[in-house]
């Protein structure tokens, strides 16, 4: 029975190790694909008809461009920790000519600028520190997928305007955006020189894919080898035990 359990564990560890090897190959292909994608020329945003098919595999970190005007009074700030320190991402809807909106992460601001970018609502819908709503702007950046969770032990609180993640659906619902795209744009392109301004610092997108699959694979294969060694030990022990008991059985038969 013990040997059967050991065989089952050995096969299970081998299967898990092989799965991690396959995951590693998939992750390396993904990294290569995204690296090629982020250095391509910006393209127009996917049209609304294509939104249901926009997913991370095909669109994450795709360089895009969009034109419209800021809905500055609907800006939200999401907490951020960057190489520049702790602060906020300034997320403002961009109203496009076709009536749709796309959330744009305009960049990072330190915590002491919070009131400048999210003061009490103005009567005309404008916010301090932003362009006039009628000004047409063009945004270039990376298409990003929604972030529906606020993180470990942290949850977005729309009523209190306390955001820990860029949850597109929740932000759109809270800000009354009825035709918002299911993704957002991180303003700024990799390698592009950012103009020095006193506004949000764009171009801070971190492109990182955890790739510990080789370590996991070696761990599972190591456990498989340890299990195999234990099986060999148990098999030898049982064989010696049977061999040791054999003469005693013969001696008992002779005495009869």
Image (cartoon, helix red, strand yellow):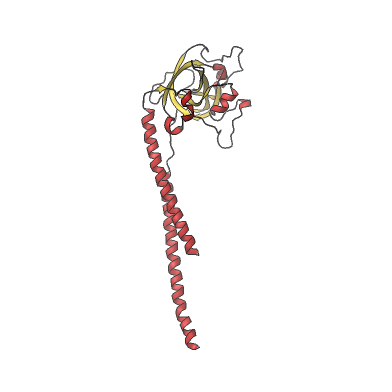
Q: How many marks?
A: 0
| Residue found farthest to the bottom | 256
Left or right of residue 184: residue 21: left
| Residue 138: % across, % down | 44, 16
| Residue 48: % across, % down | 48, 23
- The residue under the point 42% across, 60% down is 228
Left or right of residue 169: residue 202: left
- The residue under the point 56% across, 18% down is 116
The quadrant in which residue 128 appears is top right
- The residue under the point 43% across, 51% down is 15
Q: Residue 61 or 131: which is nearer the viewer?
A: 61
| Residue found farthest to the front | 49
Measured along the vertical axis of the image, is residue 230 above or below residue 238? above
| Residue 180: % across, % down | 53, 23
Residue 184 visible in the picture? yes
| Residue 110: % across, % down | 52, 24
Measured along the vertical axis of the image, is residue 138 above or below residue 168? above
Residue 83 visible in the picture? no
């Amino acid at each position: 029975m013990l040997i059967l359990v050991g065989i089952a564990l050995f096969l299970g560890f081998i299967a898990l190790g092989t799965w991690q090897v396959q995951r590693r190959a998939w992750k390396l292909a993904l990294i290569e694909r995204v690296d090629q994608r982020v250095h391509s020329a910006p393209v127009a945003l996917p049209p609304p008809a294509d939104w249901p098919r926009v997913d991370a595999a095909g669109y994450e970190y795709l360089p895009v461009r969009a034109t419209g005007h800021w809905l500055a009074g609907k800006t939200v700030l999401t907490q951020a920790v960057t190489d520049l320190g702790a602060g906020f991402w300034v997320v403002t809807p961009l109203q496009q000519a076709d009536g749709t909106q796309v959330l744009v992460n305009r960049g990072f601001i330190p915590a002491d600028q919070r009131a400048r970018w999210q003061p009490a609502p103005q009567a005309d819908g404008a916010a301090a520190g932003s362009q006039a709503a009628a000004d047409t702007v063009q945004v270039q950046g990376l298409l990003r997928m929604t972030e529906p969770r606020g993180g470990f032990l942290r949850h977005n609180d729309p009523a209190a305007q306390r955001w820990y993640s860029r949850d597109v659906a929740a932000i759109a619902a809270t800000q009354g955006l009825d035709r918002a795209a299911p993704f957002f744009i991180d303003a700024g392109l990799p390698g592009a020189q950012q103009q020095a301004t006193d506004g949000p610092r764009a171009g801070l997108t971190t492109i990182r894919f955890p790739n510990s699959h080789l370590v996991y694979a070696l761990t599972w294969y190591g456990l498989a080898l340890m299990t195999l060694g234990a099986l060999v030990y148990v098999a030898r022990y049982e064989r010696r035990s049977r061999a040791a008991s054999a003469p005693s059985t013969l001696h008992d038969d002779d005495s009869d």
